[in-house]
């Protein structure tokens, strides 16, 4: 049994008589410590998949099992617990609380967690040891995203989910963020999933999952992932 | 656009309806009373003067002719009235009128029960009230006026236009200089009439000692204005100087004075409350429209880059404001109507009120509407032009989020470090949105003051011996409408705050915050805002209540029960709780996908 297993997962939206299948028969598996990239263009179903993996929505069919916990069978309360303790979400637009300092932004997230890491140390690790008392408005885009990553890591989750983490950043900063995510995955042995439309990122992943029109097009394994420094786009 | 901002629209309309409806309702109630009384007096041809001869023989024919000439064209009835003391201890007298039933043109009564007398031994009696005992039709009464022993039978019960206060009518047996207590205009301590009997003057050879004069040129004196009172008082003085008479005018009539007094009070209450209600409404409407235009920032940016003129862009929002105000004003008109009738009805607890006039006084209403319209539309125009004055490039970029700042409290580590984490966030948030904070504080403070005003008046009536059901009725209405206003204000301010912070709420949910925890995150700020508002509410309440009491009912705050100062904030807190309950659903319904969406 893989660390993260998706079996025949489907999501259907019904508006009046119209049925939309956002995801159909999605199956793949990922191991702990892997760095995976989910590739798909707009409308392919990335957001829906994110919602399901992030515990923000229920699947209409199939199963999602993370570390032997059946996520799809969880009720609202269970999903909340799942989001709280098992998932660390990294947003494209950082979503930091604007009137809390960097440190407090991490604190507010881990306050409710069972097994969290020390916020200050995590911020140190992402290179923001000197900026803990700054507010988001006083931080650059890259720094804000690093706070966001620190926030996610500090929760000590089983899975790190990243929604277009470099979407709002410039090229150089984006690369730096991806390196950080990759390091977190390898050094801490965490499963990190990056959802993106940027094809160039496939070379740095251990596994590349292509999604198109709500269905899995392919799952490729990279025997020799390239370091991010060597990737250009 | 209306669908997008439907909640804003409804809030705006609701506030306009509540404040304008209430305030103009009170104001026009007083006018309604005036109009109705005016009609009544005209219809019943009430006497402007009752000239009582001081001579035992009554008026001579010469005097009567002179007076008829003096009051050229007026209706003049001759008759007699005496007040026989009945009970010295209880201070009660019996009034007997001797009138010509065939020529009753002045002070024409309404027949309530029974029928007209058919013989001279039959008589009318005045309708009973809280003091006047009255008789039943067919009852026989033993009388001994002027040394004669009579037995008359009551054939009919009437209502005289001179006596419609349910608290009775003072008799002629009071000291010459007896005056009503100016603060309550009541008959306490006065000798009052136990009954009034109207007897056919053909029954006894009584002299004509009374002349009842109703002047003809009514049109000069509309609605018993100060000009009228002036005129009758001066004329009375002139007559009393020239003839050996006592002249009684409407200015001495208890029913008239008391009704005028209380309707004046209601009007004054209306004036004072108008300021408070309009202030709150204007403030919240201002905030509402300004934040609406702020939200529409990117739309406005697009249109500007497409080449639309500022006015063309803003006209949409001006229309929004106008329609909201218009609909609100329209509905407020009916609230106004309903309230003025209702207050008129409440006066029925103290008076036999005349038939209600359907005439509407629009002055209050129009002033209020104008004020609110100017505030709302003005705010829209100002905010709109400010927005379109920005460079389109700046507008297209999302507004930079307000920078977080350390708050004053942080400089006191003693307190700050002890504060649980969630309160730190709350305190920062409260100070971050300064203008909203101030808005909420003012709105809550004034709302609390309004509730206090209502409670204070109610307290005076119930426990303070003020005993006016008119004031009581108005007090209850004030509390109700102040409550409605408070709820609407709180709801509007909170709802806007929540929709502007959708992203934060969604993020917290994704981070794994439970529904109640997310709600708590928002509620803490609201309660702090309201709490501070209540603190400021005390001085504002004290001011309003002092003003109300001093100016209107000539009482002091020391006479108020201590507990109403606690009840008012409790009521506002209860309303806050109610609004947070209603908004809970809205908070937890936020879609977590809001956190994934692009900024703005």
Image (tube, coloured by chain):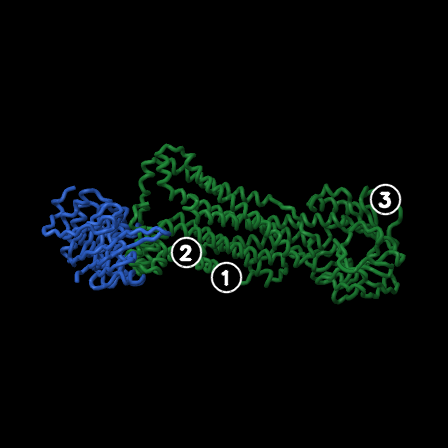
Chain colours: A blue, B green
Whether labels 3 and 1 belong to a single chain: the reply is yes
Can residue B542 be seen at all in this image of the molecule? Answer: no
- SS assignment at label 1: helix
Displayed quadrant of residue B93: bottom right
Can residue B124 be seen at all in this image of the molecule? Answer: yes
Tell which circle, 3 or 1, labels the residue nearer the N-terminal end.
3
Q: Residue B462: give its label.
A: none
Q: Mark 3 and mark 2 in contact? Answer it, CB < 8 Å.
A: no
Nearest the eye: A68 or A127: A68
Distance of label 2 from label 1 (alpha carbons): 24 Å
Q: Chain of mark 3?
A: B
Where residue A102 sits in the image (x, y, percent)?
Answer: 25, 52
To which residue does mark 2 refer? B583
Q: State whether residue B37 is above or below residue B169.
A: above
Whether labels 2 and 1 belong to a single chain: the reply is yes
Distance of label 3 from label 1 (alpha carbons): 65 Å
Q: State whether residue B78 is above or below residue B571.
A: above
Q: Nearer the viewer, mark 3 or mark 2?
A: 2
Where residue B26 sits in the image (x, y, percent)?
Answer: 59, 51
Q: Chain of mark 1?
A: B
Residue at figure coordinates x 52%, y 54% from the top left: B482
Q: Nearer the viewer, mark 3 or mark 1?
A: 1
Q: Residue B567: give its label.
A: 1
Displayed quadrant of residue B97: bottom right
To which residue does mark 3 refer? B66
Tell which circle, 3 or 2, labels the residue nearer the N-terminal end.
3
Residue at figure coordinates x 86%, y 47% from the top left: B64
Label 3: how many Cα within 10 Å (few below 14, some 14–19, many 20+):
few
Q: Is residue A87 left or right of residue B79?
A: left
């Amino acid at each position: 049994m893989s660390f993260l297993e998706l079996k025949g997962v489907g999501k259907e939206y019904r508006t009046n008589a119209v049925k939309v299948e956002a995801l159909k028969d999605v199956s793949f598996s990922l191991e702990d410590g892997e760095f995976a990239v989910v590739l798909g263009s707009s409308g392919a179903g990335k957001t829906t998949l994110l919602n399901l993996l992030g515990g923000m929505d229920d699947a209409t069919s199939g199963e999602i099992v993370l570390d032997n916990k059946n996520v799809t069978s969880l009720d609202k309360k269970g999903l909340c617990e799942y989001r709280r303790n098992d998932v660390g979400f990294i947003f494209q637009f950082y979503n930091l609380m604007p009137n809390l300092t960097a440190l407090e932004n991490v604190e507010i997230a881990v306050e409710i967690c069972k097994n969290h890491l020390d916020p200050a140390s995590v911020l140190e690790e992402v290179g923001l040891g000197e900026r803990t008392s700054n507010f988001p408005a006083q931080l650059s885009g890259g720094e804000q995203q690093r706070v966001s990553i620190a926030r996610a890591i500090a929760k000590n989750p089983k899975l790190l989910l990243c929604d277009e983490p470099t979407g709002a950043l410039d090229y150089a900063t984006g690369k730096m963020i991806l390196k950080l995510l990759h390091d977190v995955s390898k050094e801490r042995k965490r499963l990190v999933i990056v959802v993106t439309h940027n094809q160039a990122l496939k070379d740095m992943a251990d596994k590349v999952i292509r999604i198109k029109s709500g269905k899995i097009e392919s799952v490729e394994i990279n025997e020799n992932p390239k370091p991010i420094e060597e990737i250009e786009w | 656009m209306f669908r997008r901002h439907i909640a804003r629209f409804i809030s705006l309309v609701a506030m306009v309806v509540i404040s304008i409806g209430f305030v103009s309702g009170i104001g026009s109630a007083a006018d309604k009373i005036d109009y109705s009384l005016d009609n009544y007096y005209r219809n019943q041809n009430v006497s402007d003067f009752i000239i009582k001869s001081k001579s035992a023989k009554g008026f001579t024919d010469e005097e009567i002719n002179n007076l008829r000439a003096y009051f050229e064209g007026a209706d003049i009835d001759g008759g007699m009235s005496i007040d026989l003391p009945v009970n010295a201890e209880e201070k009660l007298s019996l009034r007997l009128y001797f009138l010509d039933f065939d020529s009753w043109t002045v002070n024409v009564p309404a027949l309530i029960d029974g029928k007209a007398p058919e013989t001279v031994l039959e008589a009318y009696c005045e309708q009973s009230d809280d003091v006047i005992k009255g008789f039943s039709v067919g009852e026989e009464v033993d009388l001994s006026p002027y040394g004669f022993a009579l037995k008359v039978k009551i054939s009919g019960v009437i209502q005289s236009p001179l006596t419609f206060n349910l608290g009775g009518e003072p008799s002629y047996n009071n000291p010459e200089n007896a005056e009503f207590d100016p603060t309550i205009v009541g008959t306490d301590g006065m000798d009052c009439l136990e009954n009034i009997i109207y007897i056919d003057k053909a029954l006894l050879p009584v002299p004509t000692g009374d002349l009842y004069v109703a002047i003809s040129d009514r049109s000069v004196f509309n609605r018993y204005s100060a000009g009228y009172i002036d005129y009758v008082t001066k004329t009375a003085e002139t007559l009393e100087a020239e003839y050996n008479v006592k002249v009684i005018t409407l200015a001495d009539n208890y029913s008239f004075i008391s009704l005028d007094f209380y309707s004046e009070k209601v009007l004054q209450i209306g004036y004072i409350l108008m300021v408070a209600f309009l202030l709150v409404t204007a403030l919240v409407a201002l905030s509402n429209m300004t934040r609406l235009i702020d939200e529409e920032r990117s739309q406005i940016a697009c249109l500007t880059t497409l080449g639309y003129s500022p006015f063309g862009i803003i006209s949409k929002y001006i229309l929004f404001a106008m329609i909201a105000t218009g609909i609100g004003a329209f509905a407020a008109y009916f609230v106004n109507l309903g309230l003025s009738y209702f207050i008129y009805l409440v006066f029925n607890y103290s008076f036999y009120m005349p038939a209600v006039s359907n005439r509407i006084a629009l002055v209050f209403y129009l002033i209020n509407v104008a004020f609110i319209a100017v505030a709302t539309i003005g705010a829209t125009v100002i905010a709109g032009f400010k927005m379109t004055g920005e460079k389109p490039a700046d507008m297209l970029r999302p507004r930079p989020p307000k920078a977080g700042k350390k708050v004053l409290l942080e400089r006191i580590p003693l307190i700050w470090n002890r504060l649980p984490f969630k309160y730190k966030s709350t305190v920062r948030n409260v100070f971050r949105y300064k203008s909203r904070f101030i808005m909420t504080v003012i709105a809550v403070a004034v709302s609390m003051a309004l509730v206090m005003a209502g409670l204070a008046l109610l307290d005076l009536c119930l426990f303070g011996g003020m005993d006016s059901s008119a004031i009581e009725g108005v007090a209850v209405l004030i509390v109700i409408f102040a409550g409605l206003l408070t709820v609407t204000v709180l709801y509007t301010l909170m709802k806007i705050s929540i929709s502007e912070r959708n992203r934060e709420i969604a993020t917290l949910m994704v981070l794994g915050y439970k529904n109640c925890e997310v709600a708590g995150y928002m509620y803490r700020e609201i309660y702090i805002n309201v709490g501070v508002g209540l603190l400021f509410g005390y001085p504002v309440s004290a001011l309003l209540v002092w003003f109300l009491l001093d100016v209107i009912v000539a009482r002091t705050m020391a006479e108020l029960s201590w507990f109403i100062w606690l009840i008012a904030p409790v009521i506002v807190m209860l309303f806050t709780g109610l609004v947070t309950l209603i908004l809970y659903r809205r908070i937890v319904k936020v879609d977590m996908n809001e956190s994934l969406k692009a900024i703005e």
